[in-house]
Image (tube, rainbow, N blue to C red):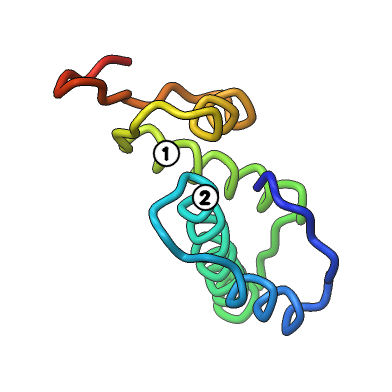
Amino acid sequence: MGSKCNNLEWNGLINDFANQSNGNSIGSIIRRLCLAISVYLIWQERNCIIFRNEFREWEDLYNIGCEIVKMRLLSLTMKPSKAVFKAQADWEVLFKIRTNGTVTH
């Protein structure tokens, strides 16, 4: 996510997320996406275990989560900034960039 995580316990992680800015910056958007996708995948995995007696390895869930984040990021149109270009490199995606009313890839 590009942010330092001091807490690996679920409650502490949620508190850390809640105490950070929730604006429209790319970091905030990625952080919220990662949290939402994590909750969704945990819920989905729980249901697979309970109802189908199937489970996936954490590495598989991590990779699925990263791919979902990438797909969601591809739909964004962003203003150019250092943070946006860093996020593009970190996540290996190309945002639609809006400059002077024009959108480019």
Q: Are there few (<14), some (14-19), or many (20+) residues within 10 Å of tag 1?
A: many
Look at 66% across and 53% down and name the residue there: 61
Helix, strand or loop at label 2? It is: helix
Q: Which residue is mark 1?
A: 73
Look at 52% across and 50% down and name the residue there: 30
Precedes in sequence: disc 1 or disc 2: 2
**Residue most extreme to the front:** 100
Helix, strand or loop at label 1? It is: helix
Compare residues 101 and 18 and report the one nearer the observer: 101
Q: Position of residue 104 (x, y in %)?
A: 27, 15
Q: Quadrant of the C terminus?
A: top left
Inspect the image, locate mark 1, and give the three-letter code of the amino acid beneath it. Leu
Q: Quadrant of residue 16?
A: bottom right
**Residue most extreme to the bottom:** 11
Query: In the image, is residue 37 above or below residue 30?
Result: below
Inspect the image, locate mark 2, and give the three-letter code of the amino acid beneath it. Ile
Q: Quadrant of residue 38?
A: bottom right
Circles 1 and 2 in contact, beta carbons < 8 Å? yes
Compare residues 100 and 13 and report the one nearer the observer: 100
Q: CA distance from mark 1 to mark 2?
A: 8 Å
Disc marking residue 30: 2
**Residue most extreme to the left:** 101
Compared across the picture, whether 13 is left or right of 79 comes to right
Q: Position of residue 2 (x, y in %)?
A: 68, 44
